[in-house]
Amino acid sequence: MKVVVITGASSGIGRATAKYFAARGWKVYNLSRRLSGEAGIINIAADVTVEEEVKKAFAQIRSESGHLDLLVNNAGFGISGAVEFTELNEARSQFDVNFFGTFNCIKAALPMLKERQGRIICISSAAAIFAIPFQSFYSATKAAINILVCALANELKPFKVSVCALQLGDVKTGFTGSRVKSYAGDDVYGGAIGRSVAIMEKDEQSGMSPETIAAAIFKTANKRKVKPIYTVGGQYKILAFLNKILPHSLVNFVIRKLYIK
């Protein structure tokens, strides 16, 4: 039986993905601070930002299952607000979960993944290539994930461990409601922070379903070979392509018009 670890599988995309894999015969571990509440999912309580907890979790997986075929780095959250008014501890927390949490899990999983010539799938975002105003630190963490994946793919090539990132567009989940929003300085910016966040959240609530993303992750898990970066969602694939061929100044101008009315 193939074994997958999905971080943050207690809700949203992670939970839908855990259900999708379990229904298709995989042994699924949810590595999260909260239980998934789904039958057939094995829960291990761990904070991905705490290295010792992550190491202990993967030691338990080795003890119980003996091997690991796939790691899906999904755990993450978002903050919004103006760079000027964001506290350092808030920015660090964003990177601790989204980037360093991913790093912790990759390090702990690699010994088992090397043994099985397994795969790592990291959940990225279209925000990695489209720097969203007033969501700069979230965008930065996802851009960092993309770079980590590209470098890691080459590092792990000799071990036949494949690595990729899925850049997601807007998805309708509880992620929107759990975003840590700061409107500090909104008066200084003429209300632009509030308007930008409102537009962003409206787009998310009209976005793809978690089940659509789960199917994309499963499809990627079963590919014979993977590219470092994939974009999920038809319109987002078009936008990602345009981003490659258009001047950065033009792309940034369009983003400004979309999010800062």
Image (tube, rainbow, N blue to C red):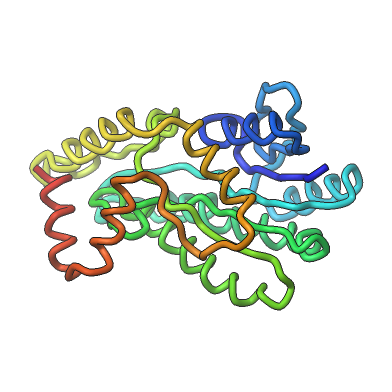
Taking the spot 52% from the left edge, 57% from the top edge, the residue there is 99
Nearest the eye: 173 or 67: 67
> Is 44 situated left or right of 178 in this image?
right
Q: Quadrant of the N terminus?
A: top right
Q: Quadrant of residue 46?
A: top right
Rendered position, 212 above or below 153: above
Rendered position, 21 above or below 155: above
Taking the spot 41% from the left edge, 47% from the top edge, the residue there is 232
Taking the spot 73% from the left edge, 37% from the top edge, the residue there is 28
Give the image location of residue 166, x and y in percent. 48, 52
Taking the spot 33% from the left edge, 53% from the top edge, the residue there is 237
Give the image location of residue 87, x and y in percent. 36, 51
Rendered position, 38 above or below 219: above
> Is 92 situated left or right of 22 in this image?
left
> Is 111 situated left or right of 127 in this image?
right
Q: Quadrant of residue 209?
A: top left
Give the image location of residue 177, x and y in percent. 39, 28
Q: Quadrant of residue 161?
A: bottom right
Nearest the eye: 160 or 149: 160
